[in-house]
Structures are given as structure tokens and as C-alpha cells.
Amino acid sequence: MNAAAGAVSLRESAQQHAVAPLAAATVRGRPATARLIGRDGALGAMETFLRQGLAGGATRTVYGAAGAGKSELMEAGVEAAAGAGLRVLRCAGARGAGPAPRSGLLQLMWPLLDGPAPACGPGPLRDLEELLLDGVSDAGGTPLPFLVLGALESAAADRPLLLAVDDFDALDATSADVLAFVARRTAGRPLAVLMAARPDPRCRTLLTGLPELPLGPLSPAHSAELVALRRPGCDPLAERELLATAAGNPLALLELPAWTGESVPDLPPSSDRLAAALAPGAALLPAATRDLLLVAALHPDGELPLLMSAAARLGGAAPGFEAVERAEREGLVVCEGAGLRFTHPAAAGAVVHGTGPARCRAAHAALAEVLERDAVRRAWHSAQAAQGTDAVLAARLEAVHGDALERGEPVTAVRMLRRAADLYAAPEDQGRCALLAARLAHDLGSRRMARMLAHRALRHPLGPLGTLCARVLAGQRDGNGDQRRSGADPANWPVPKGPVEEEHALELARLTAPEITGDAERSEALLAFLDRMPQRAADPRLVHAMATVGGTRRAGVVVARLSAASDTHLVPVRDLERLGEAALLAGAALRALDLYRQAEHRCRSRGLDDRLPQLWLRQGLAHLLMGDWGQAGRSFARCGETTPHRGPDRLASAASLLGRLVRGLRAGTVPAVDAADLAAARHSVRFVDDVVAVATAWARVEGGDFAGGHAGLLALLTDPGRTAVARYALVPFAEAADAVGADRGARALLNRLAADTEADRSSPQAAAVAVDRSSPEAAAVAVDLTSPVAAELAVARAVLSDGQEADDRYGRAFAMDLSRRPFLAASLRLAHGRLLRRRREVTDSRVTLRQAAAAFTVADAQARVARITAELRAGGARTETVAPGGAGPASVRDLLSAQELRIARLAARGLSNRAIGEELGLAPRTIGAYLYRIFPRLGVTARTQLVAVLREVRDD
């Protein structure tokens, strides 16, 4: 057949055998896209490969680790090829035992050998059969590769062929060599060769230069999607453990048993199929290597000398470095410095799968002996090695579980408490540990485990409040079928007696407060209950519960107690987060920001990086409510970028939603709110609905829809259950009321809020808190100590003031320290500038308005800058505060000319007018004139302030 005829034949073959899109194909009865989640790119590449094979021959090698989904992808390609009319020949390597010589080729070619004779006659196939079965033939010395290629070419002439070779790296050497020979000679033939292999070095060498299709791990989002599809109803805590251990491996995601925490002694989870895939030769390793791998699987963070010491105690003889080398050659572990790391997190369970309980307990005991400096790990391994009851060991576990929490290991803390409950013999001790474990599981989001542990705790004596707490966690219903009602009514709670009952009372209040925020009667009952515990007034749980249900009624008390807590460096991170949320709800956003930053610093110093996104989200929320939208946007973006996305991750959804709110506030446009994101965000920010409502109404004010913004904020401020967040928007509310002529009603509302705040601040509960205002903590929140929203009230009252009252109101507002509240300071200048313009004090008005514009520019409040531009134009001033076209906010580059920017930079470096003039060739008096124009435009009054304003120019 000449080349032209061959080309015509291939075109005809491609037309006759069209490949349908693999996205619409089915794999073992399921759509390929539903079965192969996260492999859209690989399916598209497979479709292209099949078309290339029909058009003129193609080869593709699918590389991936064990369990990556190579066989499933190949199955999709095979079914698509069969649907297009191709003939499929298949073979697969055999792992474990050594394959027989030429077994792969015999498996592949047998359909041809056992079928009807081709048009060229039976001779070549008979010679090939003899060679494959007996190792000799009468083919006149024709090499095996050429016999195979000739037979395949003859078969492909009748009907295009697809050779599907699974586990290529496990084929016998002869079959691998021949198939590599064929794979390099598909050009010009209707022949496609598809091979799947693990990234074995020998395999890579043999197939060097052939096109590859790598299969990496699934993304966290696709991993969560696969788990949701194939393992619905998985507990959130178990799902997090599963996703972390599987690390994107599809087989591990489907095969790993869900963690229940009930197995004793503890052993990493695995299954027969997963062990066969990830560690097929582990059982054949020497005993010393198996001992080393066992202790490494039970203590994955241990250094190699420590692991070898534990393995020596386990096996009776110290393993040499040859034991490590053997495990490395098997591809099970990798040595990194002094550590020993498994090549895949699920490999730890695969290596020790099937280990007996006695051997496992001995390994735990060996680890406990060598872990002298780690109290948490030593207690944990000792507990896993123990049998029966041991009160001393149980007490050790209970004592160190708090250390595990501070190390950022809450799951370990739950396991330790569960094990302590098993080891205690006294019923009251068992109940106490089970209840504490249930509370921690509830905080982790594992409602199923919390209910199970709470039911276990209820079988033991707990005390009146402990029993109520366990019933709430268990989700029990009362006689009328009202779930949690019997435990959620604080009016029925007894007075706590003793420190144990006080702990139960605080936890019960913390759990109940979010459930009763809309019930005024029960909220008042809870506040009365909390007031009966003055000795625990500064406890973060009590302060958080009071802020949650108290709203504006107890804001002053909450702020006073927050300010009195001067030893926050001793408070655990989880309690710092609770205090931060309490501060936000009480109107003390600056205090909340300080607490969240302190928690972030603590997490960084202890390596708790997984908790940072939550803290960044909270910091961004504080910035949003204070009007620092530039910093808020950066915090939300940081949270969204670093959050480990687990499908529709709740934290990422909250960051995305709040980021859209910030962009809407900047531009003065009503943000779009997705219902799914809002539902997911509620798990990260409990009061996010109020934040969305306030931001939406606030954005209307920013965009000039004063009527809509005023109506929305008025409804929120007059709703007792939603006033806490709405109070941050008092200034835009006042601006909107002034614009629509509703200033009289707005002033009455502000006066009522001020009276309520003053009454709360002077209440007996607030007066009982001794605050040292000379302390750094009190100084940092000086504005907040006067009143939770003193700054907002002062500025809002100034905005609404008129006549002789205005000077007094503005004087009081300007006298406040607003250095850490730039949005309020700029809003005050904006309102004052407008007042000065109406009084025809044009020069002072322009200076004040330009200072406000510079501050709003730094805060990225685009709509505010546009509003100031209108004010300046109304006063006949040059509108230098917006970029050309007036479409967006001005940066420093927009406010200054190139020469002015050079002079500002030199002045920011500390150079005098004379030094600047010498460098630029200008007179010192000219430099002074330039600076006289620059300072008002940038809103600064001293050279030292230029450094912060010019920072954005350095960042460009």
C-alpha cells in the first residue's frame, strides 16, 4: 500500500468511526463525568487521543500514583472507542508475584490468535502463537516485535485497533519491550496504543519520548465532591479526617473507613484494596523494616532516631539504616532530614493494615517509653497500650487534653477524653470526660459524635446543670416534642453550686445563647442567670453569651468586662476568638480587632496555620464594620486564597460573600447575595444575615439612594434583635436622614440610643467591673470605654446638627481621638466641609473636603470620593480628587503631578526644603509653596504623615 492510498484509507476510517465526546460517554453504567470527578481535562485529552489514533495512529501513556484513577480513565477511553466501532485488545500487568514470560503479550494477542484467520493467511499468526506459547517458532528467525507489529497491522487493516495496556510497569520484561516497540510505530496505521503505568523509573526509561497524560491528585474541591456523591451523609469531622488522609487520591477517598474513634488500640485506617494498591509488598519486608514502619505509622511526626529507638524496643534489636533503605526502595517512605515521611498519608495505614491488637499495643508502649519530653503523646500512647481500667492514666489524659487543644489538635483532645472515659472506673469520672468530649466534638462541627458522646454521658451521674448540658448536646426533646426546649429555657436552670457545676453552667449558656437570640423572654432569663455568677464575670464564655443575647442592652457591661481582662496573653486562642466576637456584637470593633490580631500572633508563634483563615475573616469583618474597606477586602481575599477549599467550603463562601459586600460598599452598588453562599457563611459568621442587611442598606447610601438606605437602616436600628450590628452604620443613617429630610426622627432615635447606652454603662453590672484605664489595653480602646458606639453617635449627631448646636456638636466630635477610626474622621470632615460651604467659608471648606477625600482614597471608598468631588465642584474648586473621567477613586498619583509626587517623596524621607531644592534645582521657598499645596490634597498636616500616605505608591 503506497502512502497516498494509506492516507485515503485512514481518512475513510476516521469518517466511519467517529468518536463521541467522552463527557457524554458512560463508564460501567455511569456517565464518565459523574464517575471521573475532577478529570474533565483528562477526558478531553483522551478524546483527542482517540481521534488522532483513527486519523493516523497515536500513543498515550497515562501516568499516576496508585489509586489515582488510571484504570477508570482507561475504561472511559475503551468504552468510547468501542462505541466508535474500534476493536479493543487488552492486557494488564500482575503485581505481587513475578509475571510469567510473555504473559502480557499472550493476553493481548489471544483474541487475534483464537479468532478467524486474517486475509494474509494463518501463517504469521501461527508463528506468533508458537513463539508466545513455546518460546520457539519456524518463522525463519523473525524477531518477536516484528511478528507482533505485523499481526496488529493486518488486524488494523480490517478494523481500527485500540491496544489498552493497564499496569504497564507490572508487565513481564519481554511484553513491556515489545509493546514499547509497537507504541513507537503507530504512525500511518489506524492503531492507537493506550498504556497506564505508575511513575516507575524503569518504565519511564522504556517509554521515554512517548506522549504522556499525567494524573495528579484531585483538588480539595473535587475530593469533597466525590465524597459527597459516593459517601453521602458523612460526618463533618470524619469528612475532614478523610480528606486530609486521602490527599486527593480517589481510591483512598472511596476506600478509607470513616473515623469513629472507637478502635483501641489506635491504628491508622485502611482497607484490603487500599493496602494492596499502596503497599503491595509490605508483608514481604524484613521484620526490622516492618517494626520501623509500624512505629512510624503510629507516630508520624517522630524523628528517625526516636522511631528507631522505639522499633528497637518493639523488636528486641536495633534496626539498621538498611531497614530504612528497604522501605525507601519499596516507595513507602522518604527520608527528609531527621524525619521519616510516608510517600502518601494513606500509605501509613496501608503498611500496617492487618496488624494484630497485641502487636499494636506493644508498639504504642514502645513509643510511650521513648517520648519522655512530650507529655501529650506519651500519655496518648500509654493509654493505647493499656488494657482494662487505669484511673491514674485516665487522670493524666484528662489533665493534658488542654495542652493538645493549645497545640491546635482538637481531634486529639476529643480522642484523649474518650479514652479517659474508658479508663476510669468511677461512673462520675466517666460521665465528666464523656460530656467534655461531647462539647469539644460539638465545637468541631461533629454533631453526630457530640450526640453519641452526650448520650454516653447521660448514662452516668452529671449533676443538674451537667445533665441539662448533655441533653442539649444530645438533642433530646421534652414531653411535648419540642427539641432542646427542656434544656434551653434558662428560667428553669438551678443556681450552680461548686466549680464543676459552674463549668457546666457556662457551657450550657454558651450552647444555648445562639438558639434563643430571637426569644426576648428566654434571653432575659439567661442574662439574669449569668448575673448570678459574679465570680465568673470575666470568663470568655459568659461574656460571649451575654453579648449574644444581650444585644445593645448589655453592650456597656460587655465592653467593660473586655477592658478589665488585662491578662489576655494567658487566654487560650479559642477564648480570644469568643471575646473578639463579643466585642464586635457590643460595638467595640477596635477591641475585637486587637483580640483577633493577638490570636493571630499566638497561632503564628505556635504553627497553627490552619486557624489563620478564620481569624483573617473576623479581622476583615471588623474592618468592614469600621468602614476600612480597603483593609477589609485584603483580609477577605487573603482568607479565600489560603483556605483549603473542601468543595463548597463554608469559610471560603463567607469570605467570598463578604468580599462582594466590600466591593459594593466601595462603589456604592447594592451587592448580589447568593443564597447558597449565605447559607454556608452562617456556619462561619453566625450573625452574617445582619451584616448583609446592614451592608446592603449602607451601600444604597453610598450610591446615592438615600431613601432606600434610610428605610433599610431605620428598620434595622428599631429592631431590638438586629441593632447590635446596625449601630456601626449610624453615620450613613444620619447622612441618609439628612438627605431625605427625616433629621428630626433620626435625632430622636440617636438620643434614645444614647440614653440606652448611658443607662447600660451606669448599670450595677458595669459599675461592678473595675477597669484600670491606665493599662495599655484600656488605652487602646479609649473610645470604646466611653460608650460602645460613642464615636459613631458623636459623628452622627454632628451630621444632623444645625444652627448654633452644630459648632458644639462638631467640637465634641473633633475632640475625640479618632486616629484609629479613619472612616469616622473622614466622614466628620465631609459633613463639616459641607456645613462650611453652606456658610460660605469656601477656603476652609475646600481644605476640609480635600482632607476627607484623601482619607477616603486610602480607604478605597470610591463613592465617597465622588461625593466629595461634587461638593468641591459646587464650591467652584478644581476637582483634583478623582481620576480622569471621575469614574473611580483617586490614588496619590491622581492627586499630585509628577513634580509634586517627587517633592512629596523627598519630604517623606526627612529632607529639608533646602535639601529638596538642591536635588531638584529649585529654591527652598518654591519647595515650601509646593508642600503648601500638597498637604491639603493628601489630608496630612506634617511631613511624618507622608510616609503612610505614600505607601500605596511604593506598592504599585
Image (tube, grey):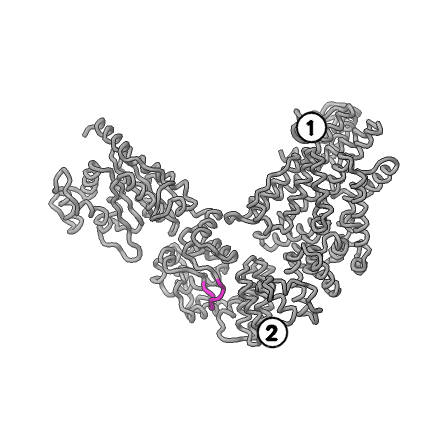
Whole-percent x and y of residue 293? 42, 62
Number of other residues with Cα within 10 Å of mark 2, as a class: few under 14, some 14 to 19, many 20 or more: some
Name the side, left or right, on which 61 lies relative to 651: left
Going from N to C along the chain, the mark reached first, 1 or 2, is 2
What separation in Å lies between label 1 and label 2 (alpha carbons)?
Answer: 70 Å
Q: Nearer the viewer, residue 717 or 453?
A: 717
Number of other residues with Cα within 10 Å of mark 1, as a class: few under 14, some 14 to 19, many 20 or more: many
How many marks the image carries: the answer is 2
Q: What stretch is highlighted in magenta?
A: 260-267
**Residue highlighted by disc 2:** 461
Whole-percent x and y of residue 176? 26, 47
For the stretch drawn in magenta, what is the main secondary structure? loop
Res 172 seen here: yes
Looking at the rendered image, the disc whose residue lies closer to the viewer, 1 or 2, is: 2
Name the side, left or right, on which 447 lies relative to 907: left
Regarding mark 2 in the picture, which secondary structure is present there?
loop
Q: Nearer the viewer, residue 210 or 653?
A: 653
Whole-percent x and y of residue 426? 57, 76
Whole-percent x and y of residue 736? 74, 37
Tag 1: residue type? Val
Q: Check residue 882 in the rendering and tell me which mark sits there, or answer none.
A: 1
* In the depicted structure, whether residue 172 falls above or below residue 118: below
Furthest residue to the front?
480
Tag 2: residue type? Pro
